[in-house]
Image (spheres, rainbow, N blue to C red):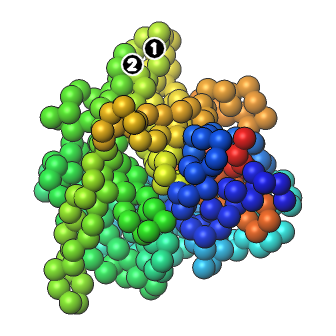
Amino acid sequence: MTHRHRSIGSLIRNAALAALPGTVLAGTPDGRSPCDVVLTPYPGLTIPADTRVADRPFGGISGVDFDQRGKRLVYISDERVAPDATTAYLSRKISKNSGSAAPFTALAPVALSPLQGVSPDDGVDFEALRIHPRRNQWWIASEGGADPTATAWIGRFDQGRQRMSRIKLPVPLDAAPQNRSIESLAFDAQGRLWVALENALPEDGPQGNRDRGAELRIFRLSIVDRHSVVKTAVARTEETLRYRTEPAEVGEAGDSDIGVSEMLRVEDTWWVLERAGLVGKDGSYRFRSRLFCAEQDPSSTGRLRKTLLLDSAQLLDSAQRLDPLEANFEAMTIIARDGLPPLLVIINDNNFAPGVATRVLLWEVTGR
């Protein structure tokens, strides 16, 4: 194993659930940035638009995580379904030899895991899924529902996928605009929860569009349970960071928007997916997603500076060629592999559109 594989691999092996210790690259003697990484394309998987799992249509993937105990991916969809039908999708078990074939077929969804205890009044629009790095709990964020009273929330689910609690969000997260609220959850190596908003709060400025980025916030939250038998809980803000997206795409015509669709906590950095919906000069619609590595800006307290790691526009003519409607990246996680570089997983939301596949795209992660 090379030194660069050993550095990143050892980080992810301990955390494994998209929360990585921040002590190796950040503390390298040559002063390299923790964002100084290389993403090398790896054979992924295309899941056809008409795929069904246990007679349920598969698609609309808005969150994913790697279940270290079950050795499989867990997918969550933003499909609008009856609350008693909310379901996660499970991939096959990923063995040591799963990644030796191309494409990585073990990542295909093969089973369902129904979620229990979701009320019809909750407002179900699931946008993020994380498995706690120290407990066998699923944490799922919902943007709420069409009813103004069905606000955004975070739910904790136990080993039986029964909801343990609905977490009440603190000010100002509870006032985020509908469909512009929580899109991302991330745990760091200490098991602390980070939350990213999709777009700017009203008091922080206008929403991102073709010409301007969005000024949004990333929060570190602590959770206070109200009762010994946990049914409700309250989140408190422990830290707030500022992050600015890019404009959707300078030079294009038509209505466009931009926001954050996913986030990982990697070492002392935040890997942030920015997703833009673009209307072209000919009226056609397409997506563009960019992955940035963000780190604390030493020149500005509480603000993050960022480095571009990946641009879906570059994949249009690559071996991982995408249809422009497949670039709606909404889900991201990391798979640790013994003795091999970890794999970054990015998945699109196909919006259940006719003919639009779900793409499970992979990259090996190494240091320079």
For disc 2, the marked residue is 210
Residue 7 rendering spot, x and y as whole percentages: 70, 57
Give the residue displayed 26% in from the left and 36% down from the top.
Answer: 200
Residue 193 sits above or below residue 177 on the image? below
Along the viewing direction, whichever of 162 and 59 lies nearer the viewer:
162
Count of numbered circles on the image: 2
Q: Amino acid at mark 1?
A: Val
Residue 124 rendering spot, x and y as whole percentages: 31, 60
> Could you classify mark 1 by the number of other residues whose Cα lies within 10 Å: few (under 14), some (14-19), or many (20 or more)?
few
Q: Are marks 2 and 1 in contact (CB under 8 Å)?
A: yes
Examine the rendering and report whether any part of residue 83 can be seen.
Answer: yes
Give the residue displayed 17% in from the left and 35% down from the top.
Answer: 202
Q: Quadrant of residue 6?
A: bottom right
Give the residue displayed 33% in from the left and 78% down from the top.
Answer: 163
| SS type, badge 1 | loop
> Could you classify mark 2 by the number of other residues whose Cα lies within 10 Å: few (under 14), some (14-19), or many (20 or more)?
many
108 sits to left or right of 165 = right
The extreme bottom residue here reads 229
Q: Amino acid at mark 2?
A: Arg
Examine the rendering and report whether any part of residue 259 can be seen.
Answer: no
Location of the C terminus (image quadrant): top right
Residue 13 rendering spot, x and y as whole percentages: 65, 68
Residue 339 sits above or below residue 271 on the image? below
For disc 1, the marked residue is 250
286 sits to left or right of 82 = right
Residue 124 sits above or below residue 135 on the image? above
Residue 356 rendering spot, x and y as whole percentages: 60, 41
Residue 193 sits above or below residue 265 on the image? below
Q: Quadrant of residue 105?
A: bottom right
Disc 2 or 1, which lies upstream in sequence?
2
| SS type, badge 2 | loop
Q: CA distance from mark 2 to mark 1?
A: 6 Å
